[in-house]
Image (cartoon, rainbow, N blue to C red):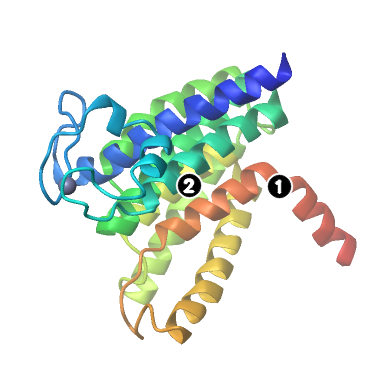
Amino acid sequence: MEIFAIGFLFVVGMVFGSFFNVVGLRLPKGIPFSNDRSICPVCRHQLSWYELIPVVSYLIQGGKCRHCAEKISFIYPFMELLTGFLFSYSYVQLGFTLELIKALLLISLSMILVVSDIKYMIIPNKVLLFFLPFFIVLNIFRPIEPWWSPIAGAVVGFSMIALIIIVSRGGMGAGDMKLFGLLGLVLGLPKVLLTFFIACLLGSVFGIFFMLIGIIKRKQPVPFGPYIIIATLITYFFSDPILHFYFSLI
Ligand SMILES: [Zn+2]
């Protein structure tokens, strides 16, 4: 029974992952994504249903468009697989609980933001505003202890980045600030700080690495959103062992 539930969430995750790719790419440009079939961005051929099966179509077509043979970015199947993995992993960790809904919503938000931030360096307001009411309702039905933790988390998360924007004159964007406000609400006060710390750590390590191998240049603006997102998921799933390890050291 268990293996069916895990497999089911994996498939559902891949289908949603495919949808999140589309939302992340189209929403910042104002292209409707609900009533419009996907097309190949190069030859503009409209894709049939059998060209839109997550991961499978990519593998069968050898990573190329069936019509113009243009290479399809591996980002698409990667995001689909990652979403499938994270959906099923959440179920393994949480079972069929209210917390599972929160985890799936957080993963969905994350996947859309990673796509739009990498592609356009934009964290769309519409995406944050869409998810906000769900997290507020979940906080009511499944409160984080103590009760003020999400409110304090939202205030601290938002103001912390606002301060960085003022001091660094644009080191981070308004999108990062609003995202941290939302994350504070989702994770609560101590964990939003841990998320910020991990995001800065990842940003510095990978930033230096990408500079060394020549992918990015000095002073080139880079999206910080993906680091925030990875840090959020690490904090959400592993904050207890991380904090336990930390306190065992001091
Ligand atoms: Zn094509």
- Residue 34 located left or right of residue 78: left
How far from the left and from the top, in percent, is residue 184?
A: 52, 44
Q: What residue is pinned by disc 2?
A: 155
- Residue 243 located left or right of residue 6: right
- Residue 96 located left or right of residue 229: right
How far from the left and from the top, in percent, is residue 115?
A: 35, 49
The structure residue drawn at horizontal position 71% and vertical position 47%, both measured from the top left corner, is 238
Vertical relation: 70 (above or below) 153: below
Give the mark nearer the N terminus: 1 vs 2. 2
Vertical relation: 74 (above or below) 22: below
The structure residue drawn at horizontal position 54% and vertical position 62%, both measured from the top left corner, is 199
Characterize the local packing of mark 2: few (<14), some (14-19) or many (20 or more) Cα atoms within 10 angstroms: some
Say which amino acid is labelled 1: Phe
* Disc nearest the viewer among 1 and 2: 1
The structure residue drawn at horizontal position 59% and vertical position 63%, both measured from the top left corner, is 197
Characterize the local packing of mark 1: few (<14), some (14-19) or many (20 or more) Cα atoms within 10 angstroms: few
Q: Judging from the image, what secondary structure is the residue with disc 1 in?
A: helix
Vertical relation: 8 (above or below) 226: above
Quadrant in which the C terminus is drawn: bottom right
Q: Is residue 80 visible?
A: yes
Q: What residue is pinned by disc 1?
A: 238
How far from the left and from the top, in percent, is residue 37?
A: 17, 29
